[in-house]
Amino acid sequence: MTALAPYLSAFLLEHLPRERKASPHTCDAYAHSFKLLVCFAAARLRVKPFQIELEQLDVPMVLAFLEHIESDRSNTARTRNARLAAIHSFFRFLEYRLASSLDQACRIHAIPMKKTDQPLASYLTREELVALLDAPDRSTMSGLRDRAMLHLAFAAALRVSELVTLRVDQLDQQTQASIQVMGKGRRERVLPLWKETARILKIWLAVRPKSGDPELFLNAAGHAMTRSGFEYILSKHATTAASKQPSIATKQVTPHMLRHTCAIHMLQATKDIRKVSLWLGHASLQSTEIYLRADPTAKLEALAAMAPPMLRPGHFRTPDKLLAMLSQAGQAKNYVE
């Protein structure tokens, strides 16, 4: 039997950050996936987590874990696939370091990803967006910070990880205000800012504490804003905005919805999917096509450009051969004769 802990530690602490140079977000996601797996396996085997053996993480155990996170934790198929991807990556790491695990790794790799639905991207209308951006209290420092975060998250279509890790030195306030963003897949992009967004950021920088972390947005303790912190702030202001726009209460307002909202509004304004893809930092246009499916404007324009077909009303008449065949088929044959 082979202890799991040494190999799992080497995978998370050495292989991912040093050999693969994976981002901190990837390392955190993989570590959380294995935390869930190890806790589930320990409870199922009735042992402590450090006592789990590598051979005990077999196919039935992994399948039971995937079923557990979908049924008991109410995770979606997309989340289930993300956990399985972390497990696949770990066993690819083992293939070259532990020859005895080759058969087990092949069996684990044979577990397929589950097909996922592709729902329409939900977004806020212009009236709902204005109500949300005006929700923070401008008379307090936290309100000025929240207003700047919401404006920047929408105007630059930032992922929540991009927003909370944005540093002050990545903001350029020269002739044309812009930000330099390190996006997904280490793709860097520079985004110009609207004058209104630049003005609101300037107001926040004037009251932002000088001491603390280098990130642009800080919490009450002077540390960098966290993902969960921004999710809480957004949820709080969405509840406030719902008093002005009740339709907001029917939507699940998430940080990624602000990104969807920017993409939809930009597509409606430019009618160019390539510009939207460039602004969002997508690697290919295929990732941006979801907004074409969600935006009804282009479909309405195509429908208006086409003339409706002129069809004359008529009645279907069955041919004689068909009636003859049906008549013969309906007659019971006397097999006694």
Image (spheres, rainbow, N blue to C red):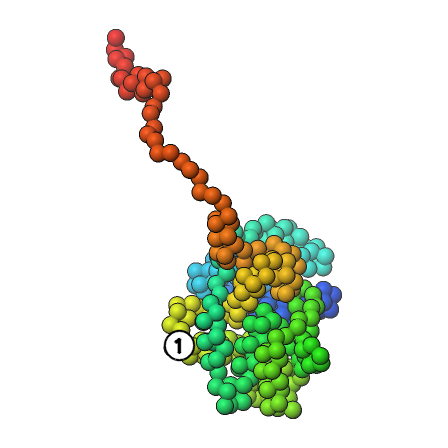
Find residue 286 and report its horizontal and vertical position in percent.
Answer: 61, 54
Please identify the quadrant where the C terminus is shown: top left
Say whether residue 115 is visible.
yes
Q: Helix, strand or loop at disc 1?
A: loop
Query: Residue at position x 58%, y 82% from top?
Result: 200
Please identify the quadrant where the N terminus is shown: bottom right
Q: Does 147 sit above or below residue 23?
A: below
Query: Residue at position x 60%, y 57% from top?
Result: 273
Find residue 146 and report its horizontal and vertical position in percent.
Answer: 53, 82
Q: Residue furthest top?
A: 337
Q: Residue furthest right?
A: 19
Residue nearer the viewer, 58 or 157: 157
Q: Is residue 252 found left or right of 36 in the rendered image?
A: left
Query: Residue at position x 45%, y 76% from top?
Result: 131
Q: Amino acid type of disc 1? A: Lys
Q: Which residue is mark 1?
A: 244
Q: Is residue 269 found left or right of 321 in the rendered image?
A: right
Q: Is residue 90 found left or right of 307 in the rendered image?
A: right
Find residue 117 and report its horizontal and vertical position in percent.
Answer: 49, 54
Find residue 147 and report its horizontal and vertical position in percent.
Answer: 53, 81
Q: Does 333 sit above or below residue 316?
A: above
Say whether residue 117 is visible.
no
Residue 33 image-quadrant placement: bottom right
Residue nearer the viewer, 319 or 142: 319
Residue 98 image-quadrant placement: bottom right
**Label 1 neighbour load within 10 Å: few <14, some 14-19, many 20+:** some
Q: Is residue 313 found left or right of 36 in the rendered image?
A: left
